[in-house]
Amino acid sequence: MTLSTLKRQIPLLSLIVMCVWWSVFYRYDHVFNDYGQANDEWLLLVDGLIVLPLICFFCIENKKEALIKSIAYIAIVILVGSFAIPAQEKLLWTYLEKLRYLVLVGFVLFELVTIYSVFTSIKLSLSFSKDPDEAISNAIASKFGSGIIGSIMTFEATMWTYFLKAQRINRDAFSGIEHFSVDQKEGTKSNLLGFILLMMFELPIMHLVLHFIWSPFAANVVSMLTIAGVIFFVAEYRAISIRPVSIAENRLIIRYGVYPVNAVEFSDIESVELHKEFVRRQPNIKRYNLTGVPNVKIKLLNQHQIFLGVDRPAKFVSSLEARVHQ
């Protein structure tokens, strides 16, 4: 982790530390609050409404992103304070608790407008047959930056783009010299479709069962989570048949479903070979395979390994080896 990346994480870490510390401070009697006699609300007001925003603006170069995070973190601090601060100590906090709903509505509206503008720019980029991955990442980075929020938004934008606009994506627009598909390997695409149909068939039955056996609220929650899962797998089903694994001029570009791009420089690759065995999850291993076992193993110089499931493994290995050796 670089120093700049670590610096960007300081606001979130500060928020977590503040929430934990002040929750303990207000909820328990100890020497720091004079055994319950010094639970003044202004202590959290200074930390949450002044110190935390200053940390955001100091650690985040993109001031728009810093402002958005400051507003979001302040809303979280107000929520924590509403539960932690004793009722008899609340003076300004009662007004802040009401204000947070207004802030939340404004924040949601702002985010919706921003997301709409992002998808508009993505749609415009796709119409010019630009690389879809670059179109999405550039549009997100211009609005949300390239930090954690940007990464999450990129994933969300990719999922919704393939769920709603997969037919507008031109497969030939992806960057790379040689492309390899992954959707036909051991019926990957067919298995995904079967899983989607199974989830959709199960949804109404499970909703009724939970509604009458448990509670309507639980039924609604589970149904909403199932619908979210269906949306993800439909996007995955469409993306896996469009996004290729590509060999570029000096790097391997791994695209798999809706997951983020993993670009591996040829200079970082130690060896490439065919593979026929099951691979367990390990910290130094990345797997890009949905059904069966991966058929390609890529060993990196840093001792990390990448396992792929592609449709033409022998051709892929020979092409990649030629590029790496070259």
Image (spheres, rainbow, N blue to C red):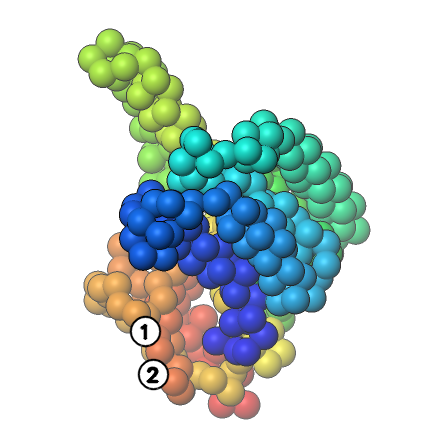
Q: Residue at x 59, y 58 (%)?
A: 51
* 141, 12: nearer the viewer: 12
SS at circle 2: loop
Q: Position of residue 42 (x, y in %)?
A: 54, 47
Q: Residue at x 20, y 13 (%)?
A: 213
Task: Tell which residue pokes out farthest to the bottom in this image.
Answer: 326
What residue does disc 1 label?
284
Residue 196 is left or right of residue 140, and the answer is: left
SS at circle 1: loop
* 53, 156: nearer the viewer: 53
Look at the picture and state if 82 lies above or below 302: above
Q: Position of residue 123 (x, y in %)?
A: 73, 43
Q: For the C terminus, give its image quadrant.
A: bottom right
* 43, 100: nearer the viewer: 43
Residue 244: in sight, yes or no?
A: no
State the mark number for residue 266: none
* 173, 62: nearer the viewer: 62
Residue contact between numbered discs 2 and 1, judged by CB atoms under 8 Å: yes
In whole angstroms, how far apart are the C-alphas of marks 2 and 1?
8 Å
Residue 279: in sight, yes or no?
A: yes
Dot 1 alpha-carbon crowd within 10 angstroms: few under 14, some 14 to 19, many 20 or more: few
What residue does disc 2 label?
303
Q: Residue at x 26, y 68 (%)?
A: 282
Residue 283 is left or right of residue 78, and the answer is: left
Task: Tell which residue pokes out farthest to the top in this image.
Answer: 212
Q: Residue at x 37, y 19 (%)?
A: 220
Q: How many marks?
A: 2
Dot 2 alpha-carbon crowd within 10 angstroms: few under 14, some 14 to 19, many 20 or more: few
Look at the picture and state if 17 lies above or below 230: below
Q: Position of residue 121 (x, y in %)?
A: 76, 46
Query: Which three-letter amino acid code belongs to the residue tagged 1?
Result: Asn
